[in-house]
Amino acid sequence: MTSETEVFLPHGWKRPKGYANAIVLPKGRPLFIAGMVGWDENEVFQTDDFAAQFRQALLNIAACIKAAGSRSDCIGRMTIFVTDKQEYVGSLKQVGVFWREVMGAHYPAMALVEVQALLEEGAKVEIEATGVVPE
């Protein structure tokens, strides 16, 4: 591994929008962040707006990254679970704004899955992340 994060695109493939196909992280200790929903530090949802819950879930991820002594560009993979694909698609512009606000221009390998429901009542999105705490 190198000391910096590297993003790879297979030859001839179209560049993905908002995620990476392949990423290599710097050397470091593994970092696993549990699924974060869009509630605040007191486990209270402040809104039922999808994009706002997405932003809060990202802020929760960012807080865990910081607490572990890492950086957003050291996240290599995220899985996003949403309860309504159409609500996600309808919120893409605002989701993109919130992504750049919280995560900057770093786009890890990602999967997005529509699920019937999330465990926490009122949650519309849950995001889990995997990365490293760099050496």
Image (cartoon, grey):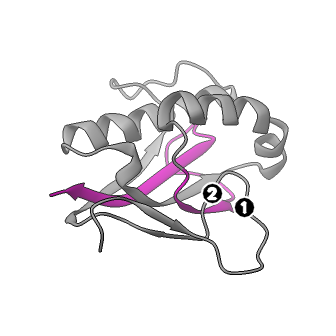
Give the alpha-carbon distance from disc 2 to disc 1, as whole Å: 6 Å
Left or right, residue 124 beside residue 129: right
Circle 2 is placed at which residue position? Answer: 19
- Could you say whether the residue bearing mark 1 is in a helix, strand or loop? loop
Residues 3 and 87: in front is 3
Residue range (magenta):
107-135
Circle 1 is placed at which residue position? Answer: 16
- What percent of the width, then of the height, locates residue 127? 50, 50
Q: Quadrant of the C terminus?
A: bottom left
Residue pictured at 77% horizontal, 39% vertical: 92
Residue pictured at 53% horizontal, 18% vertical: 46
- What percent of the width, then of the height, locates residue 2? 30, 69
Identify the residue at the far top of this view: 46
- What percent of the width, then of the height, locates residue 74? 35, 53
The reply to whether discs 2 and 1 touch (Cβ–Cβ < 8 Å) is yes
Left or right, residue 134 beside residue 15: left
Q: Does the magenta stretch include residue 101?
A: no
Residue 43, compared with residue 57, is above or below; it is above
- Could you say whether the residue bearing mark 2 is in a helix, strand or loop? loop
Are there few (<14), some (14-19), or many (20+) residues within 10 Å of tag 1?
Answer: few
Left or right, residue 31 beside residue 75: left
Residue pictured at 36% horizontal, 65% vertical: 25
Q: Quadrant of residue 111?
A: bottom right
